Image (cartoon, rainbow, N blue to C red):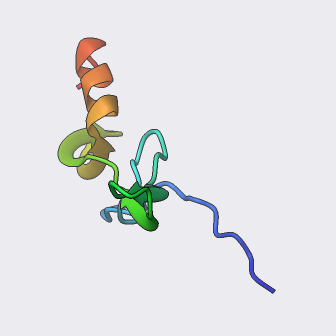
């Protein structure tokens, strides 16, 4: 039986899961490529992740944050 693995926040000193935003939990999306003749083949849209050094509980950590989340945090002066 298959089971879904839930997203977990990154652990101490680690980067966490790949291709998942550490703050919002956004991950890759999938869909179809469409050619001129409208033939469908599968493709993937990955998240635009950026490595950012953030101070969490007085300790600097490197997190992988989506560009959208980074933009929001900068606008709110959180980073």
Q: Report whether 60 appears left or right of 2.
A: left
For image coordinates 32% across by 65% down, the residue present is 14
Residue 20 as seen in the image, left or right of residue 6: left
- Counting every numbered tag in the picture gives 0
Task: Tell me the quarter of the picture where residue 54 sits.
Answer: top left
Q: Quarter holding the C terminus?
A: top left
- Of residue 53 and residue 40, the one placed in the foreground of this image is 40
Splitting the image into 4 quarters, where does residue 3 fall? Answer: bottom right
- Residue sticking out furthest to the front: 37
Residue 65: % across, % down: 30, 44
Query: Farthest residue in the right direction?
Result: 1
Question: Who is closer to the viewer here, 57 or 3?
Answer: 3
Residue at point 23%, 20% (across, down): 74
Q: Nearer the viewer, residue 72 or 30?
A: 30
Taking the image as shown, residue 29 lies to the left or right of residue 52, namely right
Query: Does residue 1 lie above or below 70 as drawn?
Result: below
Residue 28: give x, y in percent of width and height: 43, 55
Q: Residue furthest bottom?
A: 1
Q: In this picture, is 4 found above or below 20?
A: below
Seen from the viewer's position, the closer of residues 72 and 47 is 47
Looking at the image, which residue is at 81% across and 86% down? 1
Residue lying at the far top of the rendered structure: 76
Q: Position of residue 27 (x, y in %)?
A: 45, 53
Query: In the displayed structure, would residue 42 be above or below residue 30?
Result: below
């Amino acid at each position: 039986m298959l089971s879904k693995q839930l997203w977990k926040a990154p652990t101490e000193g680690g980067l966490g899961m790949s291709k998942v935003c550490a703050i919002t939990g956004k991950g890759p999306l999938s869909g179809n490529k469409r050619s001129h003749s409208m033939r469908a083949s599968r493709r993937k849209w990955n998240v635009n992740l950026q490595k950012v050094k953030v101070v969490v509980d007085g300790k600097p950590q490197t997190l992988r944050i989506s560009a959208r989340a980074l933009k929001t945090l900068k606008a709110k002066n959180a980073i």
